[in-house]
Image (cartoon, rainbow, N blue to C red):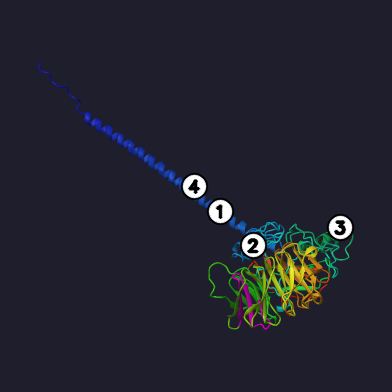
Amino acid sequence: MYPHRAQQPPNRLGELLDQVRAEFEAQAHRSNDYDQQLATQIHEMELVRTKIFQLEQTHLTMKGKYEEEISRLRHELEQRGGPSQGGHAGPSQPQPPVIGHGPRDLFQGIMAGGGQGGPGLAPPPQEQQGQPGMPGHMQGQGPPGLNQPPPGPHNPFNYGQPQGPGLNGYGGPQPPPQAASPGPGNKPRVGPPGLRGPATPQQGQANPYPGSPGIARPTPPPQNQQLAPDFQYTREQLEAIGNQLSELDPEKLPPHLKRQGEDWHAVFNPRVPRRLDVNLEHNLAHQSVVCCVRFSHDGRFVATGCNRSAQIFDVQTGKQVCHLQDSATTQDGDLYIRSVCFSPNGLFLATGAEDKIIRVWDIASRSIRHSFAGHDQDIYSLDFASDGRYIASGSGDRTIRLWDIQENQCVLTLQIEDGVTTVAISPDGRYVAAGSLDKSVRIWDTTTGVLVERTEGEQGHKDSVYSVAFAPHGNHLVSGSLDKTIRMWRLSPREFPGRQGAPGPKSGECIRVFEGHKDFVLSVALTPDGAWVMSGSKDRGVQFWDPENGQAQLMLQGHKNSVISVAPSPTGALFATGSGDMKARIWRYGPYNGP
């Protein structure tokens, strides 16, 4: 027998191929399932993405509506004098000028409208932080090289305020009024010094207008009773408000005690007879913070100072007629013009800026006629003498200088212990006054350089002086301070020790304290006839005061940021304001003939 091999099934190979084919088909099927699942998930993700996009669009739409509503309400609040919060005009505004070498945020602090205790605010003399809207050198730290005043005077905000009193028709630098109002029994009289003593500014920063208590009218009815059907204030509320007219809600006042425009309003003190009316003439828009305003001697033009340039506007039309800018200066950074001043003949405009240079422009040719260098720090204030030959300047370098245009040189340098924030020359040109971070106002004889008077002590300001202005006849001086008060001083030229061998400077006699502003008073001036004292404040208000009794006549709200500068026209009837809201405005005031 022969052995033979076992036979394998003939279809084994086919079976194996079938198995492979089946596995391949199964994998292909699973792959299709995975593809379908992936496509489904991708589709779901697209749906989710679309939904998220729709939600985002809905959110943006709702946000836009809310922002519009908030903006509308905020505008309505400001119309009523309410506080400016959030990014009102601030965010869109260019960096405000800084005063001095110190931290460059002082000016910003004031512009920001922060309340007391904020950076660089006057209340805490020792904690001075940059204030919005305030010149930096006066911030917490004084200008380099300057001695810090005992209470750490805050930023000298005079960075661009027109100062010299009678010269250009306006009472020179502006003093900050006090916040505390005289109160019911407050009847300032032109009498003994320290009439109201160092005003006690009311520190509770009340919001400019919204529904605060109002003022009652004269001859009010019994207590807690309204004075009239259309007068929604009681006598007690009136007494509590005093001169703090920003506490009055226009909605609660009768028609004859308020005046409203498109974007401004004025309220009149119910406790005194209404004697003035006011109206907006021109709104002058700028590209940066308006640091200073000033009229020409004939009242036909008004000059403004802002970042890098000075402008001159026709008062009649409100149109810009001249733009002055030094093309030779570097274009890097900011260069704010903090003070402008017309020569008495109206041919020249002097400007003082952060680069420590005084430029005297020939307006007709738009060229620089004189350029004075000598100050070591920023120039905060300028004033032309009535003869047009001399210019006084004040700087953070602690000096006041007198410049002779004819001789093209400095003829007098006066040194003090702290930064100079404001200067003013008396109407007759014999005296020059200066306000300082050390809370004092000093007066010198311009012919001898002798210090003849100094205001300080019990009757003096409690914080840095930012503005000074001589009365038209030169017999009084008003000063404004970060203590929120305005003070009026009686001057006695016949007693001034201007002659050799005479005793030292006499102490000033304070005859009036004006209290009512809720924040720093940044600018003060007197009308050409001396009938009214006007003031601009960080509280965004402008107030008119009766110098005879210290009572506030009216409070005007229109600017959306600090009122940095106020200036009356030398010819009367008009005044101008400059603000951190990048606007200057020309207003008309006059006798009120209504009820």
Do the residues bearing badges 2 and 3 touch, measured as CB atoms within 8 Å? no
Marks 2 and 3 sit apart, C-alpha to C-alpha, by 44 Å
- For mark 4, give the secondary structure: helix
Q: Earlier in the sequence, mark 1 or mark 4?
A: 4
- Total number of numbered discs in the rendering: 4
Q: Amino acid at mark 1?
A: Thr
Q: Earlier in the sequence, mark 4 or mark 3?
A: 4
Q: Is residue 464 above or below residue 532?
A: above
Q: Earlier in the sequence, mark 2 or mark 3?
A: 2
Q: Residue furthest right?
A: 222
Q: 10 Å neighbourhood of mark 2: few (<14), some, or many (≥20)?
A: many
Marks 1 and 4 sit apart, C-alpha to C-alpha, by 15 Å
Q: Is residue 318 above or below residue 98?
A: below
Q: Which mark is residue 306?
A: none
Q: Read off the residue under disc 3.
A: 224
Q: Read off the residue under disc 2.
A: 106
Q: Which corner quadrant of the image does residue 116 belong to?
A: bottom right
Q: x, y percentage for residue 285? A: 62, 71
Q: Is residue 133 visible to the viewer in this orientation of the structure?
A: no
The segment highlighted magenta reads 341-363
Q: Amino acid at mark 4?
A: Val
Tell me if residue 454 is in the magenta stretch: no
Q: Amino acid at mark 2?
A: Leu
Q: Which mark is residue 58?
A: 1
